[in-house]
Amino acid sequence: MPSGLFAANTLPETPPESTQASTQTSRPAPLPNAGIPLAGLPISVKDLFDVAGQITAAGSTVLA
C-alpha cells in the first residue's frame, strides 16, 4: 500500500458548472456492445492538459 506523498489519490477541483452541465446533457448508458463502450462514464482530466476555463498548473503549486 503506498503511503506519504503518493498516497493522496484525490480530485482537488470539480467545477460545479461542468458537473451541472454534464448532468443536464447526460444520456442513458448505451446497451452493452453498442459500439461506444465508455459513453456516459465520468472521467477525470489531470491538470497537465489545458482545459477551457480551468487553470493548468501542471501539478506544480508554483504555477497554480
Image (cartoon, rainbow, N blue to C red):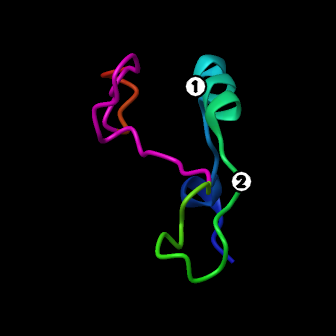
Foreground residue, 62 or 17? Answer: 17
Spot occupied by residue 32 in the image (x, y as percentages of width and height): 65, 80
Spot occupied by residue 15 in the image (x, y as percentages of width and height): 59, 22
The quadrant in which residue 55 appears is top left
Spot occupied by residue 60 in the image (x, y as percentages of width and height): 35, 33
Magenta segment, prevailing SS (helix, strand or loop): loop
Reply above or below: 12 against 35: above
Name the side, left or right, on which 52 lies relative to 12. left
In this view, the mark in front (1 or 2): 2
Magenta residue span: 42-58
Residue assigned mark 1 = 18
For badge 1, the amino acid type reads: Ser
At a point 57% along the width and 83% down the height, the residue shown is 33
Residue assigned mark 2 = 28
Label whose residue precedes the other's in the sequence (1 or 2): 1
For badge 2, the amino acid type reads: Pro
At a point 34% along the width and 29% down the height, the residue shown is 51
Image disc number at residue 40: none
Spot occupied by residue 44 in the image (x, y as percentages of width and height): 52, 48
Name the side, left or right, on which 18 lies relative to 53. right
Disc 1/disc 2 C-alpha distance (Å): 18 Å
